[in-house]
Image (cartoon, rainbow, N blue to C red):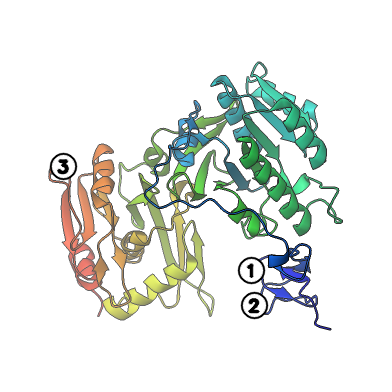
């Protein structure tokens, strides 16, 4: 008798006939759980139990745009793609204590003021604790209905009766479904609870926002299939020692991904930051070695930030390479290119790289800004005041132009920058507010900016 594949990997979905500690398909550990597949219905095959015919349409069919509701929180509306879409499912993740519940309580109150019937279900805190936070935020008079429950059957029954427009579930890891024989927070429970809530939202036209815990690697805890179920995945980021927070969209079926919203944590909750570039830039009155201002793009928004580098002689056999806010592997690549293509070696030196303000950057056009900061630090030679840098660096030492360069330079001009160091071929605004110097390769950039190279 053939064995049935009753076990599945929660990371990649691969199925197997027995449990194992490591998935053979993706290599992940402790992700294989028992999971009975979908049945084929009565009879010996799909043909024995005929289903309904699926309605088909051509690609030219016109559909009405998804209705949206804007809140008073403009930064949240920006990340959502212009507002909250009816019958959508949003998953919000973030580190413990970063302010997820504060953000959602403020957002729920804002949507309630716009006329949406809103319900906030807390599975982690008692109702009295949520009311205490609401009083601290000045939201005690908001028309938000509050509930504290973890039994999903009771929650869905309540939603069927109340018929709200918006539901916040804080958090999905605390929900318990009595049809699943496992503990709350397990892979099976999280997947089943998310499926029930998303299906309910689609059937009833209700927008649902789910809060998700994150692992120590920064990923939302539980099966990755939950992120595929929902329409939008948001991450709330920030450093404990910093006042600002970044709301980042990593998936959005109704708007651009990688869009960010910037908030500042205050005694009265989260306040919007209208000009994030000013927040991430330090005092620029006196240029200092090791600092380079990068004109980046986050989603559709141009954001300026400062890369700070420190290079010092290392007493260790293997020098340190410490990075905050950027990819450590990409730093290693930049150091190798500087050594091989420009003759500047960092052997025997500790290298520290930081982005001021705790911002995280993944834009590849930050390569040239990082190289400029490292060169400025090792040569003890600051960049000229009022200078921004951006461009992508290839392994051959060639510089590639960055996209949306005009938006980057216009934002830099608004903040008082007058000079830009760019890769050749970069589009420059015709208004002439910024003097642009373009370079085709790294060696030319080093020679013209910091003097002759050491090669």
* Mark 2 or 3, closer to the camera: 2
Q: Where's residue 210, x and y in %? A: 65, 43
- Residue ID for mark 2: 25
Mark 1 or mark 2, earlier in chain:
1
**Pointer 1 with pointer 2, Cβ within 8 A:** yes
Which label sits on residue 433? Answer: 3
Q: Residues within 10 Å of mark 1 (few under 14, many from 20)?
A: some
Residue occupying the far bottom of the picture: 1
What residue is drawn where x is 31% and y is 68%? 393
SS state under label 1: loop
SS state under label 2: loop
Q: Is residue 40 left or right of residue 92?
A: right
In the foreground, 312 or 77? 77
Residue occupying the far top of the picture: 141
Q: Where's residue 359, x and y in %? A: 47, 49
SS state under label 3: loop
366 relative to 66, above or below = below
Q: Quadrant of residue 3?
A: bottom right
Q: CA distance from mark 3 to mark 1?
A: 51 Å
Q: Residues within 10 Å of mark 3 (few under 14, many from 20)?
A: some
Which label sits on residue 12? Answer: 1
Q: Residues within 10 Å of mark 2 (few under 14, many from 20)?
A: few
Mark 3 or mark 1, earlier in chain:
1
């Amino acid at each position: 008798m053939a064995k049935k594949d009753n076990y599945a990997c929660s990371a990649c979905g691969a199925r197997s006939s027995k449990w194992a500690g490591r998935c053979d398909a993706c290599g992940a550990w402790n992700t294989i759980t028992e999971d009975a597949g979908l049945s084929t219905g009565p009879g010996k095959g799909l043909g024995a139990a005929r289903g309904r015919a699926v309605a088909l349409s051509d690609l030219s069919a016109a559909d009405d745009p998804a209705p949206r509701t804007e809140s008073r929180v403009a930064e949240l509306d920006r990340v959502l793609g212009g507002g909250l879409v009816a019958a959508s499912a949003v998953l919000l993740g973030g580190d413990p204590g970063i302010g997820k519940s504060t953000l959602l309580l403020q957002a729920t109150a804002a949507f309630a003021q716009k006329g949406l019937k809103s319900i906030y279900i807390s599975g982690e805190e008692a109702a009295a604790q949520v009311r205490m936070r609401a009083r601290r935020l000045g939201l005690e008079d908001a028309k938000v209905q509050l509930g504290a429950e973890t039994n999903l059957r009771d929650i869905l029954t309540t939603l069927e009766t109340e018929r709200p427009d918006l539901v916040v579930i804080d958090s999905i890891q605390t929900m318990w479904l009595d049809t699943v024989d496992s503990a709350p927070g397990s892979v099976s429970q999280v997947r089943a609870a998310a499926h029930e809530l998303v299906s309910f939202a689609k059937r009833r036209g209700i927008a649902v926002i789910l809060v998700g815990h994150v692992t120590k690697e920064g990923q939302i805890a539980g099966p990755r299939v939950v992120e595929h179920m929902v329409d939008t995945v948001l991450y709330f980021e920030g450093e404990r020692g910093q006042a600002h927070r970044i709301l980042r969209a990593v998936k959005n079926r109704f708007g651009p991904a990688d869009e960010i919203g910037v908030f500042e944590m205050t005694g009265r909750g989260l306040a919007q930051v209208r000009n994030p570039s000013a927040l991430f830039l330090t005092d620029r009155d006196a240029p200092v070695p090791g600092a380079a201002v990068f004109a980046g793009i986050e989603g559709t928004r141009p954001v300026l930030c400062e890369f700070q580098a420190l290079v010092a002689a290392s007493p260790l056999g293997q020098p340190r390479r410490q990075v905050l806010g950027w990819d450590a592997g990409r730093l290693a690549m930049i150091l190798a290119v500087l050594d091989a293509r420009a003759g500047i070696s960092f052997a025997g030196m500790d290298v520290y790289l930081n982005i001021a303000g705790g911002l995280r950057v993944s834009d590849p056009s930050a390569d040239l800004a990082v190289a400029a900061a490292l060169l400025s630090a090792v040569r003890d030679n600051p960049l000229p005041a009022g200078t921004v840098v951006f461009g992508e660096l290839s392994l051959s030492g060639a510089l590639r132009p960055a996209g949306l360069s005009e938006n980057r330079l216009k934002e830099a001009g608004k903040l008082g920058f007058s000079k830009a160091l760019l890769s050749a071929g970069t589009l420059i605004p015709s208004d002439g507010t910024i003097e642009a110097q373009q370079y085709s390769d790294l060696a030319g950039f080093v020679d013209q900016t910091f003097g002759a190279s050491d090669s």
